[in-house]
Image (cartoon, coloured by chain):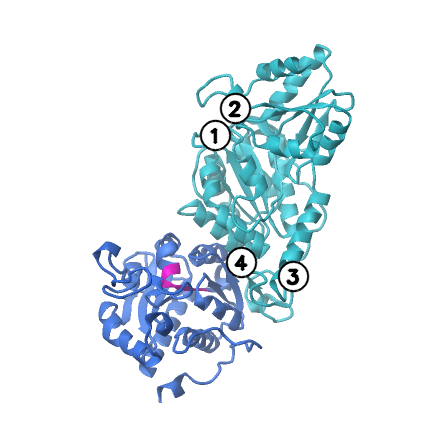
Amino acid sequence: MGERFLVQGNQAVGWGALDADCEGFFGYPITPQNEIIEWFAREFPKRGKAFLQSASETGAINMLHGAAATGVRVMTSTSGPGWSLMQEGMANLCNAELPCVIVDVQRGWNTTRHAQTDYTSVTQGGGFGGYKTIVLAPASVQEIYELVQLAFYLADKYLTPVLVVSDAILGQMMEAVELKRLDFGPAPEKDWAIRGKASHPDGNRRASSIAKGMLPTAQYPNLLSFWRAYNDKVRQMEENEVRYEVHHLDDAQLVLVAFGYVARVSQEALRRTRAKGLRVGLIRPVTLWPFPSQVIRGKAAQGAKFLVVEDSLGQMIADVRLAVEGRAEVHLVSSLDRHLPVEEGAIYPEKVVEKIEELF
Amino acid sequence: MERKWFAGTPKLWVRVPVPIPFCTGCNHGTAGKLICEVIDEMGIEGKAILVVGVGCYTVISMLVNIDSVMVAHGRPCDAASGMKRILGEEAVIITLQGDGDALAIGTEATVHAAARGEKITTIMLNNGNYGTTGGQLGPTTIMGQVTTTSPQGRNESHGYPIPAGELIGSLKGVAYSARGAFTSPVNYQRTKRYLKAAIQKQMDNVGYSFVEILSACPSNWHLSARDSIKFIEEKIIPEFPLGELKNVDSIA
């Protein structure tokens, strides 16, 4: 077993990036993710890696764009309002097919505290163009550390930005983490990297563009050839990259669906209601996109009911409803069920238990 | 006579089987030629990277035979900073932007790259309007100049044009700032010297360097090619004088 030590969720992003051989970080301060940018400011320059603070999140995502174009592993991090400013950049990174990682530590609308209110914008693509990005949703500090490593691998595999989405609770809490560099196998060669013509073995120039298909290239002779290739890539990601975790699913009559910190809360609610003999299960999407629709659809076909638990006014519930195709009841525990009416309020197991008991 | 000076295809110019979409009398093609010649003469073809924003000049990035990156409107200085921080001295990074790109939507990126003293070089083509979108008011439109969004001419309600070269030159992180034009062979050669000096500052690791180039936009100015040159000489140069605005060997 590797070394175990107490790590804060936000700082686990840094250790994950280090073990993924990330070479550069570009970011702008915003609560509740400041420990991430501070970690990189402290740890990267002394290792000869790049750290640069931008003048806004728009700046950060575009610094990331340039750095990603050089072919090395680079990342940024932000939270809700800053995430909004990055949307144009996300669309451009997807069009330019540049691999990189973005961490969004969610906060509640304009509060600085936890919530899961970025679900729709991270899964649907908040910018222009209609792109899709893989979205990884950790539920523990260990998982933040591991999914950041996976994110870099998937970004290189599909030439796309990949998101890791946590929240203020996961970001601020400390848990024991076992450091282990994950090996996902070889990543594709980056023959496309922009590093100056002399760096290319064939001596030919490379060009990276946010307007793929507009001007004819050998790779994409016209617009639809790019759109078709992009569409194929999205389908491949949907087919290959769905990840989720299940608990007590086999005999469950009621299935909780929850991610992030709320999945931990839901697990506790599951334990308490199972102890009372209620046949409750849990599906925890690890990829918010591509969404684990199939396993949900399977349970719906068996006649199970669903209870979506999420700390927003109800965003992921739309994906669960789509997955069940009208075959199952879908209920919701939302931010309106927090234990306090102020921003410190959170979804507690009691509320989830209460709702489960109502539904049996 | 003057056309003769600008004739001929430089070595690094990529020949494409489609027409290049520059209007008659537009100076952007000349800017492309200048970039090709400077890179060739400085012997940096293998390590030069052109980073372009969005405007008519974007197409130049496809036509200069070096590595290039096209990024979001206004954001070449951000992207170039990110690249330079990764690649370091092994790369010579040149951003090519318009006045709207560098000084309206991209002001933050440009000013902060300059303030940080990023070892990159910016070429800002100043044609006083948004050429690609049909000639709207830009940050460098001169007072009284008619555009599609200042149909009565630029006045107090639009505010005042930004002197890019002077503004950038006022920042500590800047090693070099100059303003050139293509109105005559002499000015072309001067502008070429400015660009070489600017790139040399980057290669010497001194700081940020900036070359503003006054550029004719006959289609949107509704002037002939010849009258556009006259307009630059008589109206724009008095507002934005040519010459070196800052030139230091150390910014410490």
The x, y position of residue A85, in whole percent, is 45, 44
Q: Nearer the viewer, residue A89 or A198?
A: A89
Mark 2 or 1: the one toward you: 2
Mark 2 vs mark 1, CA separation in Å: 9 Å
Taking the image as shown, residue A360 lies to the left or right of residue A250, namely left
The stretch drawn in magenta includes residue A166? no
Q: Which residues are magenta?
A: B94-101
Q: Is residue A52 visible?
A: no
Residue A225 disc label: 3
Residue A108 disc label: 1
Label 3: how many Cα within 10 Å (few below 14, some 14–19, many 20+) = some
Which amino acid, mark 4?
Ile
Mark 1 vs mark 3, CA separation in Å: 40 Å
Mark 4 and mark 3 in contact? Answer it, CB < 8 Å. Answer: no
Which amino acid, mark 3?
Ser
Which amino acid, mark 1?
Gly
Residue A299 disc label: none
The x, y position of residue A280, in whole percent, is 71, 19
Q: Is residue B185 above or below residue A142?
A: below
- Disc on the earlier residue, 4 or 1: 1
- Determine if marks 2 and 1 fall on one subunit: yes
Taking the image as shown, residue B241 lies to the left or right of residue B28, namely left
The x, y position of residue A41, in whole percent, is 46, 42
Label 4: how many Cα within 10 Å (few below 14, some 14–19, many 20+) = many
Circle 3: element type: helix
Label 2: how many Cα within 10 Å (few below 14, some 14–19, many 20+) = many
Q: Residue at x 47, y 56 (%)?
A: B72
